[in-house]
Image: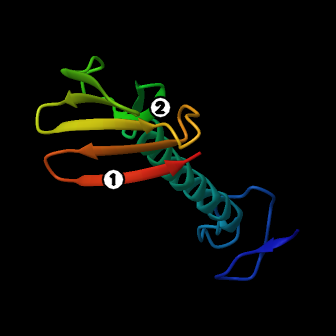
Amino acid sequence: MTKYCKSCGEELQNEALFCANCGEKASQKHKSFLNKYIVLAIIILIVLAIFITSTFVLNQTQTVKVDNVEFQLPVDYVSEPSRTDVSYDGNVKSSAMGWSNDENYIEIGVMRMTGRDKQPESCINYWWHSNKNVGLFGLLF
């Protein structure tokens, strides 16, 4: 592609930085075009790094089991429960465990009941309690 001086119109040699006729600086459009792609690629890499960091580093969880039912807790909670309680009342088995971090305490409980035909684990209920949230879930089998 032939380039011309924007000041005097003289044909420029390949890769010339200045016009040989008038001394005007030659435009470097192809380099600025590449620079735009480099800047765009760097921005995409930074956004991708932030996403990966927030997904894999900041949201880490640990798996805990209460009566063989798995739950996910944030990693800042201690790995061993500070409270464990198991009780039986007729056809009901209740298990509860508690974990804490610097600010909160979470207690998760699992209650298993046998059905009318005495089949074990026909119903499982589980709950959690923390300083901020209380919830109750039920699973029927």
In the image, what residue occupies the spot 16% across and 52% down? 132
In the image, what residue occupies the spot 11% across and 32% down? 102
**In the rendered structure, which amino acid carries the disc numbered 1?**
Leu
Above or below residue 80? Residue 20 is below
How far apart, in angstroms, are the residues tagged by discs 1 and 2? 15 Å
Above or below residue 52? Residue 8 is below
Q: Secondary structure at mark 1?
A: strand
Q: How crowded is the residue under tag 1: few (<14 C-alpha within 10 Å), some, or many (20+)? A: few
Give residue 79's position: percent from left, percent from top.
30, 19
In the image, what residue occupies the spot 29% across and 54% down? 135
Give residue 116's position: percent from left, percent from top.
54, 43
Residue at the spot of label 2:
69
Q: Is residue 64 left or right of residue 20?
A: left
In the image, what residue occupies the spot 56% across and 54% down? 44
**In the rendered structure, which amino acid carries the disc numbered 2?**
Val
The quadrant the C terminus occupies is top right
Q: Secondary structure at mark 2?
A: strand
Give residue 86's position: percent from left, percent from top.
29, 23
Q: Is residue 22 left or right of residue 100?
A: right
What label does residue 58 carry, if any?
Answer: none
Q: Is residue 27 left or right of residue 114?
A: right
Above or below residue 59? Residue 37 is below
Looking at the image, can residue 136 be seen?
yes
| In front of the other: 64 or 25 | 64
Comes first in the chain, label 1 or label 2: 2
| In front of the other: 9 or 140 | 140
Q: Are marks 1 and 2 in contact (CB under 8 Å)?
A: no
Residue at the spot of label 1:
136
Q: Is residue 99 left or right of residue 73?
A: left
